[in-house]
């Protein structure tokens, strides 16, 4: 019993140290923008991507970055290979494209510069009018992200 208690404690401790980013879905984006127009961050990842997991942990650990994103941006986390619902975005409809046991969402291909094989994680920042203002493939370190987001807000 003592070992189980210690194990549970050790599993829960990291969650107390992390801040929580508020995320939404593409279906929420129109409502969020009607409430208050903010720039939008689209974070595209996959469950199998080790760098995505490390990056997510590092970003959530940075309290100031989490507060900046929660206050000044709409954040959409988008799982590229498991999101199967139809998505309406910028007046177009995008579907999931199955490929055997796997697949990819058309929206990922539309947003990615590398149409044949998107790079994960992928970060896309849109302004209040949904125009692209920043594109980043691969790992995005918290200090670099914070600097870039503050620069976008200053525009």
Image (tube, rainbow, N blue to C red):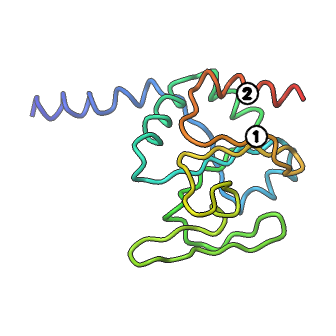
Mark number, residue 105: none
At mark 1, the secondary structure is strand
At mark 2, the secondary structure is helix
Which residue is nearer to you in this view: 36 or 82?
82
Where 128 sits versus 7, above or below?
A: below
Residue 38 lies in what quarter of the image? top right
Q: Residue at x 75, y 43 (%)?
A: 125
For the image, the number of numbered tags is: 2
Q: Residue at x 50, y 37 (%)?
A: 56
Instruction: Report the side of 138 relative to 40 (left or right).
Output: left
Q: Residues within 10 Å of mark 2 (few under 14, many from 20)?
A: few
Which residue is nearer to you in this view: 140 or 8?
140
Label 1 close to label 2 by CB (< 8 Å): yes
Q: Position of residue 76 (x, y in %)?
A: 65, 50
Q: Position of residue 118 (x, y in %)?
A: 57, 56
Which residue is nearer to you in this view: 58 or 15?
58
In which quadrant of the rendered image does the C terminus lie? Answer: top right
- Residue placed under numbered mark 2 in the picture: 148
Residue 138 lies in what quarter of the image? top right
Where 139 sits versus 109, above or below?
A: above
Mark 1 vs 2, N-terminal side:
1
Residue 1 lies in what quarter of the image? top left
Which residue is nearer to you in this view: 10 or 120?
120
Q: Residue at x 77, y 33 (%)?
A: 72
Q: Position of residue 105 (x, y in %)?
A: 59, 68
Q: Residues within 10 Å of mark 1 (few under 14, many from 20)?
A: some
Report the Cα–Cα distance between label 1 and label 2: 9 Å
Q: Position of residue 69 (x, y in %)?
A: 69, 33
- Residue placed under numbered mark 1 in the picture: 134
């Amino acid at each position: 019993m003592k070992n189980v208690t210690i194990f549970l404690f050790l599993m829960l401790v990291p969650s107390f140290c992390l801040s929580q980013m508020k995320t939404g879905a593409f279906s929420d984006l129109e409502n969020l923008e009607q409430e208050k127009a903010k720039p939008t961050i689209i974070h595209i990842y996959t469950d199998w991507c080790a760098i995505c997991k490390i990056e997510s942990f590092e970003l959530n650990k940075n309290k100031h970055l989490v507060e900046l994103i929660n206050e000044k941006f709409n954040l959409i986390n988008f799982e590229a290979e498991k999101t199967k619902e139809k998505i309406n975005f910028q007046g177009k409809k995008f579907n999931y494209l199955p490929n055997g046991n796997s697949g990819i969402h058309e929206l990922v291909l539309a947003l990615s510069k590398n149409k044949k094989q998107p790079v994960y994680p992928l970060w896309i920042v849109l302004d209040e009018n949904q125009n692209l203002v920043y594109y980043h493939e691969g790992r995005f370190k918290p200090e670099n992200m914070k600097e870039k987001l503050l620069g976008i807000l200053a525009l």
